[in-house]
Amino acid sequence: MIEVSLCPSCSGTFVPTRPVCPRCGVPTRREERPPTGRILCATELFSPAEGWSSPHRLALVELEEGGRLLVRVPGPPPQSGERGILSRDEQGRWVWIASDLSEGT
Amino acid sequence: MVSTGITRFGRRPETLEALLSEAGREALERAPSGARPQAILVGNMASGSLAGIENLAARVSDALGLTRCPVLRVEAASASGAAAFQEGCRWVEQGTFDRVLVLAGEKMTGRSTPEVTRILASSLSDAEKTLGGTMPSLAALLSQLYLDRYHVPPEAIGAVTVRNRAQGCANPHAQFQTPVTLDEVNSSRWVSTPLRLLHCAAISDGAAAVVLGPRGTGVPVLGYGQATDVLDVAQREPGIGFQATRDAARFAYKAARTSPEDLDLAEVHDAFAPFQWMDLEDLGLCPPGEAPSWIERGGGLPESSLVVNPSGGILSRGHPVGASGLAQIVEAIRRLDPQEGADDAGRRRRAVCQSVGGMGSHNFVTVLGREGP
C-alpha cells in the first residue's frame, strides 16, 4: 500500500505525505491506497543529476484511487496512459516496476 | 522607470560584481538627471553556490561607489530579477525612496554543467531531488503533458527555438546571435525527452539594471503580480502550464486595468521552448492549446499586432538565472520608450513580462507601457 495525505478542505491528495495542506494550510489526514496507477507522462533524461546513470527515467503517475507522484522507472520507457504497479527500491523511493496490467487487475 | 542598462550575456570573464556594476553604471549614466540612487536592490538566485560569494548587495554597492545607501538582495529562484524589480516598484510607490537602482545578475559559467544542474535543482522539492529530478527533466514532463493533452507532435517544439533565435540575431546583448534551422534543432542531442539541447536555454553570465524614479518619469509600470504554487510538481492541481503565472497575471492585469487584448509586446520565460506555449496561454494571449499553431501561422512576429520575445527570449539571450527576469523588463522598456534608441522603439505601447521561478513555483508578471485605453 502507499500512504497519502488527504486535505479535508480542498480534497487534495498528496504523496509523499505532508502534515499540512500546501494550498489550504489545514492539517491533513493519512490514508493508504493501492500502489497501482497509470503513467501521465514520462521522460528519459540523458544529462542526469550527479550519482545517476544515463538514461535516467522518471514518470508522473496518477494513482488509481487518487493522488499523483513522481517515480523512477528502472525499466524501459513507459508510454503515457500505461497502467502498472509501484514498488519501493532499496532506499525506499517509489519506482514503476510493472506494466501491461490488463483491465480490471 | 528612468533608465536601463544591460550587459552582453554569455561566457564572460568578469566577476558577478563586475557584471552587475557594468549594467548598473550604464543605467545610471543613461538616467536623465544623473541623480544618485537612494537604495539598491539586487536580484540573484545563487551567488554563493554558483560564484562563491555572499553578501552580494553590499559587495555591489561597494563596487559602484554607493556604499551609503540601503541595499538588499532579493531571491526568487530563476525569477529573482523580476522579484527585485517589483520590490523596487513598491519602494518607490510607497514613497520609501524616490530613486531606486534595481540590479539583477548571475555568474554561472565558472561551474561545470553537472554542478550547475545540481545547484539549479536545489530550487525543486526534496522528493523530486531524491529521485534524481532536475530542471530539464521536470520541464520535459510538463512539456510531454502539453503535447499529449493537445495532440501536438514533438517536432513542433523546434519552431519556438527557430523563431526566437531568428529574433535574437538583432539583439547585441544575446548570447546567441545566429539563426538555427528546424533540422538543426530537431537533430540536436536529447537532454530529456521530448526536449533536445536547442530547446533548452544555455548556461550564461550576465546582468541587467533599471533605475526607478517617481511617477511621471520614463515608461510607467502599470501593474505587477506574483504568485506561488505547490513546490512539488506532482502535487499541484492537475492542469497544463503554470497556475502561478495565471494567478500573477490576474493580479497584474487588475492593477494595470488592462486585459490581454490591450497588450502588443510580450517577453515570456522560454527557458525551455514549450514553456513559451504555456506562457502565452497562461497570460491569456492565446486560447488553450492554440499557441503552437498560432506561432506556426506567424503569430508573435515583429509585424504582428502582438510581438513575442522580440529580444530573442531566453533561448537567444542565455539564462543567467537571477538576471533573466530583469533582462526581459529592460528589453521591453527599450522597445516601449522612443528615447531608448532600439530600432523598433516606440512602436509598441503596452508590454507584459513574465518570469518563472523554480519549476513554476514562484512566478511574476509585470505590465509596462502607456496609460489609458
Image (tube, coloured by chain):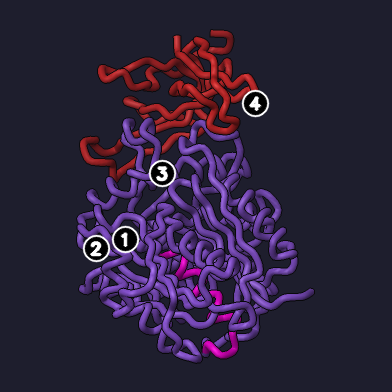
Chain colours: A red, B purple
Residue type, numbered disc 4: Cys
Q: Are marks 1 and 3 on the same chain?
A: yes
**What mark, if any, has residue A10 been given in the picture?**
4
Q: Count neighbours of disc 1 (C-alpha within 10 A) and say few if under 14, some if 14 to 19, many if 20 or more.
A: many
Residue B272 highlighted magenta (yes or no): no
Residue type, numbered disc 1: Ile
Q: Secondary structure at mark 1?
A: loop
Q: Are marks 3 and 2 on the same chain?
A: yes
| B54 on left or right of B96 | left
| A2 vs B184, nearest the viewer | A2
Residue type, numbered disc 3: Thr
Q: Could you give the CA–CA distance between mark 3 and mark 4, rounded to whole angstroms?
A: 33 Å
* Percent coordinates x, y for residue B240 in the rendering: 59, 42
* Picture layout, residue B352 above or below residue A57: below
Q: Secondary structure at mark 3?
A: loop
Q: Residue at x 35, y 49 (%)?
A: B190
**What mark, if any, has residue B109 been given in the picture?**
2
Residue position marked by numbered label 1 in the rendering:
B203
| B112 on left or right of B371 | left
Q: Are marks 1 and 2 on the same chain?
A: yes
Q: Count neighbours of disc 2 (C-alpha within 10 A) and say few if under 14, some if 14 to 19, many if 20 or more.
A: some
Residue B330 highlighted magenta (yes or no): yes
Q: Count neighbours of disc 4 (C-alpha within 10 A) and say few if under 14, some if 14 to 19, many if 20 or more.
A: few
Residue position marked by numbered label 3 in the rendering:
B193
Q: Residue at x 33, y 49 (%)?
A: B120
